[in-house]
Image (cartoon, rainbow, N blue to C red):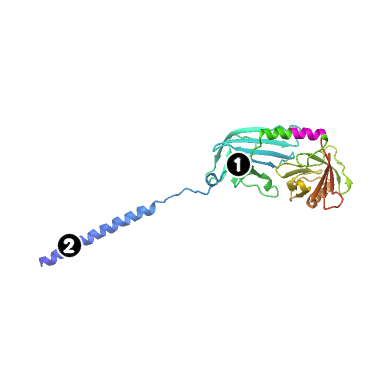
Amino acid sequence: MKTKFYFIAALVVVMCSCAKKEKAQDITEEVTDSLEVVAPDMHTANISLDYMGYYSGVTPCADCEGIETSISLEDEKNYVLKTKYLGKKETKVNEQRGLYTWNDTGNTITLEGIENGPTQYFVGENTLTQLDLEGNKIEGNLAPLYVLKKSEAPNVNQNTTSSNATAAKSESKSYAITGTKWQLVELNGKPVENKNKSAKEMFLQLNAENRYAAFAGCNNMMGGYELKEDALRIKFTKGASTMMACPDMTIEQEFAEMIEKVDNYSLNGENMSLNKARMAPLARFKAIK
C-alpha cells in the first residue's frame, strides 16, 4: 500500500515539473516572438547612391526662356544653388548656400533656407528631380525638363577660355550653333514678321546641356536635341511649351512642325539654316548680337 502511495506521489512531482518546464518554454518563445529585429534599409538613395556632386539643367519658366539651374551637393550636409533667368534684361547668377536634409525614406532632400522657390528634390541615379511645392513629382509634357543631371562642375579656367573664344568669334563675325541666340528670319521659304510689335523677337537657342529654348510668337518652347558638329547633323526630340492661347498661332505651329523634320544644319558667319536632307532650308536664322 505504501509502495503504491509513493509511486503516485512521484508521478505527481514529475508531471508538475514537466508542466513548469513547458510553461517556461512557452514564455520564452512568446518573448522571442514579440521581439522584432529591424534591419536598416540599405537600398535608400542616401545609403546606396554616390549622390554628392554637381547637377545642372534648364527648368521651365512662366515668364522667361528658362531657368538655368545648378545644385552642388558639396558634402553630406552642405549645398550651393545657382539660378539664372534666361531671356531677362538682368541675367545675373543668383547664388545661395545652406544645409540640406533627407526625408525619412531616404530618397528626397530638402534645401534649407529657401523662401521663394522649390526646395525638394528626388534623388535618383545621377539625377536630381525637382518636386512641386507640396513635394510631389511634376507630371505632364514638361516633367523631363525638371530633371537636373549630374556632371563635372565647370572649371574657372574653362570659363575664361570660353569667354576669350566668344570675343574672338564676335570679332570674326562667326558664330557657333550652340550658345548663340538665333533670331528667326525665314520659315518655310517665307520671311517672318512679328505682327505683335510689343512681343519679343522669335528665336532659337541651343545650350550646352543639349536643351533648346525657342519662341515663335506666343508660347515659350523647350526640348532636347542631338548634335554631330563634324557632320553638321542635328535632331530635335519632341518638345513641350507653355499653354497660352494667342489670336494668331500660325507661325508657332509651323515652327513646331519644322523642328520635328530637321536633320541637318548649315552655318555661314552670322547666318544659320535648319534643313531636311538636301531640300531648301526649312528655316533661316540670324545671330542676335
Neighbour class for label 1 at 10 Å: few (<14), some, many (≥20)?
A: many
Do the CB atoms of the residues marked 2 and 1 lie less than 8 Å apart? no
Neighbour class for label 2 at 10 Å: few (<14), some, many (≥20)?
A: few
Q: Is residue 168 left or right of residue 121?
A: right
Instruction: Using the image as rendered, state which of residue 41 and residue 207 is in the foreground.
Output: 207
Amino acid at pointer 2: Ala
Instruction: Using the image, tell me which numbered label, if any, was put on residue 120.
Output: 1
Q: Earlier in the sequence, mark 2 or mark 1?
A: 2
x%, y% of residue 31?
A: 35, 52
Q: Quadrant of the C terminus?
A: top right
Residue for badge 2: 10
x%, y% of residue 121?
A: 61, 43
Q: Is residue 271 left or right of residue 213?
A: right
Mark 2 vs mark 1: in front: 1
The quadrant in which residue 122 appears is top right
Quick one: SS at disc 2?
Answer: helix
Q: Quadrant of the N terminus?
A: bottom left
User: Is residue 86 on the magenta stretch?
Assistant: no
> What are the residue bounds of the magenta stretch?
164-171
x%, y% of residue 72?
A: 61, 37
The quadrant in which residue 171 appears is top right
Q: Is residue 202 left or right of residue 114?
A: right
> What predominant SS class does the magenta segment belong to?
helix
Amino acid at pointer 1: Gln
- Residue lying farthest front? 230
Instruction: Using the image as rendered, state which of residue 188 and residue 13 is in the foreground.
Output: 188
Quick one: SS at disc 1?
Answer: strand
